[in-house]
Image: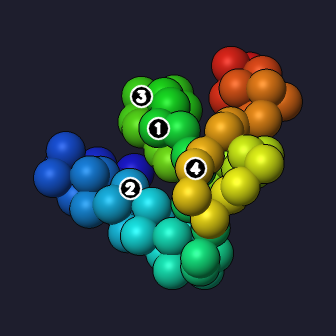
Amino acid sequence: MIKLTKKTQQAIIDHAMLQHAIDNPPHEACGLIVMAGRKQIYLKCDNIAPNPHEAFEIDVLDYLTADD
């Protein structure tokens, strides 16, 4: 089993967040950092704000999914 350092895990999360933002211009990117077992992961979320290019609002279903 490969063990990642905290610095490497953070770099992976940072990359996922940045890529999500790049893939969704001009909308605000939404996501949650959650625990998956013993590591943190980034979960993309739907931006349901009425004006997603100026604000963000995370869908309650994304919160429920993250809580599983």
Whether residue 43 is visible here, answered yes or no, is no
Q: Which residue is mark 3?
A: 38
Of the numbered discs 2 and 1, the one sitting upstream in the chain is 2
Q: Are marks 2 and 1 in contact (CB under 8 Å)?
A: yes
| Colour scheme shown | rainbow
* Residue 61 horizontal/vertical position (percent): 84, 30
* Residue 35 horizontal/vertical position (percent): 48, 28
Q: Label for residue 33?
A: 1
| Mark 3 Cα-neighbour bin, 10 Å: few <14, some 14–19, many ≥20 | few
Q: Are marks 4 and 2 in contact (CB under 8 Å)?
A: no
Quadrant showing the C terminus:
top right
Q: How far apart in space, not on screen, are marks 3 and 2 (Cα)?
A: 14 Å
Q: How far apart in space, not on screen, are marks 1 and 4 (Cα)?
A: 19 Å
Query: What's the residue type where badge 1 is placed?
Result: Ile
Q: Which residue is mark 4?
A: 55
Q: How far apart in space, not on screen, are marks 4 and 3 (Cα)?
A: 32 Å
Q: Which residue is mark 2?
A: 13
Query: What's the residue type where badge 2 is placed?
Result: Ile
Which residue is pictured at 42% across the width and 28% down the height?
A: 38
